[in-house]
Image (spheres, rainbow, N blue to C red):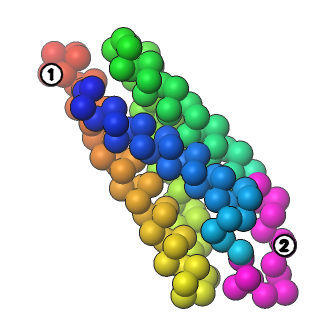
Amino acid sequence: MKRYIAIILIVGLLSIATSLLYGFRLWFTFDFMGPEQGSERTSVGIWTVINLLLGLFVCALSIDQLRRMSDFSMKLLLACVNAIVFIHIAPLCLWLAFAASDERLRGISLHLVVCLLSLVSIYALLRAMNRARGG
């Protein structure tokens, strides 16, 4: 399990970085929305805060798992990583559907990397939990 903690920690750090990129509009401008630009601020702001908190929880729980292998924190870690996958699906689909070319590629690649690494993390966590139960 400990060898997968690095991947899980990267998922948390990527979630934090994604939140910062959206929150401070460092990588995404939403210019493709034309006259509707600005209408996304509230929903993107809420998404950013939730994603940031999930990323922080994943980082903290990953570090906790390195110190001691706790069944409770492993289950909490699994729930947080699942939530990260869930929360990144909507922006991934929106970038696929609506965005312009250059920004679209950045949005899709960022959310796709987070989702794929999260799925690897979920697999590793489920496998570790199964081993801990003797299965």
Write the residue at 49% across / 41% down.
Answer: 12
Q: Amino acid at mark 1?
A: Gly
The residue that disc 2 covers is: 38
Q: Is residue 88 visible?
A: yes
Badge 2 marks a residue whose secondary structure is: loop
Q: Position of residue 39 (x, y in %)?
A: 83, 71
Q: Return the x and y of residue 40 as percentages of the image width and height.
A: 78, 68
Mark 2 surroundings within 10 Å by alpha-carbon count, few (fewer than 14), some (14 through 19), many (20 or more): few
| Residue 122 shows in the view | no
Pointer 1 local density, CA inside 10 Å: few below 14, some 14–19, many at least 20: few
Query: Residue 20's spot in the image, x, y percent?
Result: 66, 53
Q: Is residue 81 above or below residue 18?
A: above
- Quarter of the N terminus within the rendering: top left
Q: In front of the other: label 2 or label 1?
A: 2
Q: Secondary structure at mark 1?
A: loop
- Give the extent of the magenta segment: 30-45
In the rendering, at what x and y percent does residue 90 appear?
57, 63
- Position of 131 with respect to 73 (left or right) is left
Q: Residue shown at 71%/76% (left/top)?
A: 30
| Rendered view: 56 above or below 112 | above
Asked whether the residues under the numbered discs 2 and 1 touch, taking CB atoms below 8 Å apart as contact, a structural biologist would say no
Q: Earlier in the sequence, mark 2 or mark 1?
A: 2
Q: Is residue 101 above or below residue 65?
A: below
The residue lying at 64 percent from left, 37 percent from top is 53
Residue 135 is labelled as 1
The reply, left or right, for residue 134 in relation to residue 1 is left
Q: Quadrant of the C terminus?
A: top left
Query: What residue is rendered at 38% in x and 20% in y?
Result: 65
Q: Nearer the viewer, residue 129 or 61?
A: 61
Disc 2 residue type (three-letter):
Gly
Q: Is residue 38 magenta?
A: yes
Q: Is residue 39 magenta?
A: yes
